[in-house]
Amino acid sequence: MTFSVWHIVGACTIVSIVVAVLATLRTRHKDIKKVAYMMDALEDGELNFRFQEKNKFNRTLNRIRTIFEKQRQAHEQDSWTKLIRVLTHEIMNTVSPIASLSDAMAKSVDESGHSELDIKAGLETISDSSKTGNSRVWRSPSARRWICGS
């Protein structure tokens, strides 16, 4: 049995095709594992993975991770801004009456030290306001929602 050049070329072509198909299947299997790993990490809220930038697929996966990371950072910044806004509002709710009452009490005292307002009642109100202000901040539904994450 003699083999012609065409038989050898045909056999080499078939072997080359089989090797290419096997290499493609191996690469595809690795890529599927990478995507599964990335999806598990994203579902767990973790962005601590990074693939080597040796091919376009890995660069694409890293780019997706970067997009998720930027979105998370924007959401976190928004959450901090909302919390600061709520806390500022609650603090101002506490401070405003204290400032107003202390101003009124100070203006009501004449040169001889007499006042037309009841200073003791005013000071008790200021004391009560400062005590309840502290607990009011933490009872605030917005603050609780942010702190508890619900």
Image (tube, grey):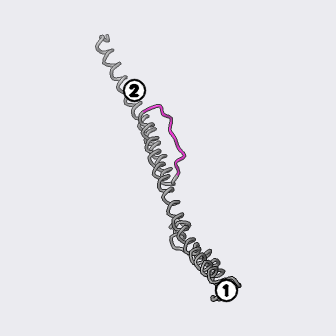
In depth, the one of 41 and 117 nearer the eye is 117
**In the rendering, at what x and y percent does residue 148 appear?**
55, 67
Return the residue at label 2: 19
| Mark drawn on residue 102 | none
Q: Main secondary structure of the magenta part?
A: loop
Estimate how packed mark 1 is, as few (under 14), some (14 to 19) or many (20 or more) residues with alpha carbons within 10 Å.
some
Q: Is residue 64 above or below residue 1?
A: below
Return the residue at label 1: 119
Q: Quadrant of residue 120?
A: bottom right
Q: Which residues are magenta?
A: 46-55
Q: Quadrant of residue 32?
A: top left
**In the rendering, at what x and y percent does residue 133 appear?**
60, 76
Q: Is residue 51 magenta?
A: yes
Q: Earlier in the sequence, mark 1 or mark 2?
A: 2
Q: Say what amino acid the circle numbered 1 marks.
A: Ile
Q: Quadrant of residue 114?
A: bottom right
Name the quadrant of the N terminus.
Answer: top left
Q: Say what amino acid the circle numbered 2 marks.
A: Val
**In the rendering, at what x and y percent does residue 54 appear?**
47, 31
Estimate how packed mark 2 is, as few (under 14), some (14 to 19) or many (20 or more) residues with alpha carbons within 10 Å.
few
Q: Is residue 2 above or below residue 148?
A: above
Residue 121 shown left or right of residue 22 in the figure: right
